Image: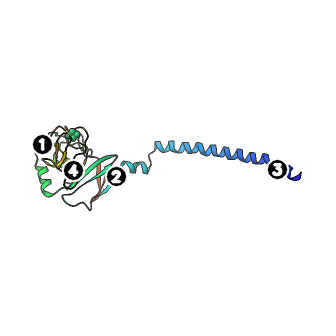
């Protein structure tokens, strides 16, 4: 009988405990909802990290190109030879189909002279999406067709880009876009 009484008396205490536990969980749960809402209002470092990409160019040899992905888009980076730089710099604006720089680092009205397409003449950085209908042009990997102007070639409908990523022939209406980027060291860029 004594054991039964003890059990009977203990029950309310256990219920109280369960009630307190449930209340605490509800409060923590509400706080758990509030925290993500606050985070959505203030993008933290991890969100910012997703919107930018650092690329080490130290292993890129003169004449080589690479493709990296940034925000789901391909970005081409070519380390140009002296000849390629000279050719791009000497191309007159009158020879260009699109006279605008399309460089996110410059004012919208900047012209497409080669020095408005690069931050350092040695490296050209462009979004690898053809401005006609969005194919990914060839010319970045070793041995790929680079088109009549030595830059990139879009095989979908035959658009030719030069070594500055400027449209020179074919249906594409605009130069390949230059994304926002900066050099964080001599050989490291941060895109975005
Ligand atoms: S999508 Fe590149 S030429 Fe049409």
**In the rendered view, would you say 60 is above or below 9?**
below
Assess disc 4: are there few (<14), some (14-19) or many (≥20) residues with their C-alpha within 10 Å of its C-alpha: some
| Residue 41: x %, y % from top left | 46, 42
Q: Residue at label 4?
A: 118
Q: Earlier in the sequence, mark 2 or mark 3?
A: 3
Q: Nearer the viewer, residue 87 or 73?
A: 73
Q: Nearer the viewer, mark 2 or mark 3?
A: 3
Q: Nearer the viewer, mark 2 or mark 1?
A: 2
Assess disc 2: are there few (<14), some (14-19) or many (≥20) residues with their C-alpha within 10 Å of its C-alpha: some
**In the rendered view, would you say 190 is above or below 107?**
below
Numbered disc 3: secondary structure: helix
State the CA–CA distance, disc 2 to disc 1.
32 Å
Q: Is mark 4 within 8 Å of ligand 1?
A: no
Q: Earlier in the sequence, mark 3 or mark 1?
A: 3
State the CA–CA distance, disc 2 to disc 3.
64 Å
Q: Nearer the viewer, mark 3 or mark 1?
A: 3
Q: Residue at label 2?
A: 53
Residue at position x 24%, y 53% from top? Answer: 77
Q: Earlier in the sequence, mark 3 or mark 4?
A: 3
Q: Earlier in the sequence, mark 2 or mark 1?
A: 2
State the CA–CA distance, disc 4 to disc 1.
16 Å
For the residues bearing labels 2 and 3, Cβ distance under 8 angstroms: no
State the CA–CA distance, disc 3 to disc 4.
81 Å
Q: Earlier in the sequence, mark 4 or mark 1?
A: 1
| Residue 1: x %, y % from top left | 89, 51
Residue at position x 13%, y 48% from top? Answer: 149
Q: Nearer the viewer, mark 2 or mark 4?
A: 2
| Residue 154: x %, y % from top left | 20, 44
Can see residue 131?
Answer: no
């Amino acid at each position: 009988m004594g054991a039964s009484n003890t059990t009977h008396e203990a029950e309310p205490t256990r219920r109280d405990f369960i009630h307190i536990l449930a209340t605490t969980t509800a409060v923590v749960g509400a706080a758990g909802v509030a925290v993500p809402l606050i985070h959505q209002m203030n993008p933290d470092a991890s969100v910012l990290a997703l919107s930018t990409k650092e690329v080490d160019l130290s292993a890129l040899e003169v004449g080589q190109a690479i493709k990296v992905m940034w925000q789901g888009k391909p970005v081409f980076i070519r380390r140009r030879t002296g000849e390629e730089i000279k050719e791009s710099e000497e191309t007159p604006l009158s020879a260009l189909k699109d006279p605008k720089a399309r460089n996110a680092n410059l004012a919208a009205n900047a012209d497409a002279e080669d020095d408005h397409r690069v931050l350092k003449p040695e490296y050209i950085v462009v979004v690898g999406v053809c401005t006609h209908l969005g194919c990914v042009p060839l010319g970045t990997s070793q041995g790929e067709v680079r088109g009549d102007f030595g830059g990139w070639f879009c095989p979908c409908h035959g658009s030719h880009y030069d070594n500055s990523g400027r449209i020179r022939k074919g249906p594409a209406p605009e130069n390949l876009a230059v994304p926002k980027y900066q050099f964080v060291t001599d050989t490291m860029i941060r895109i975005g």
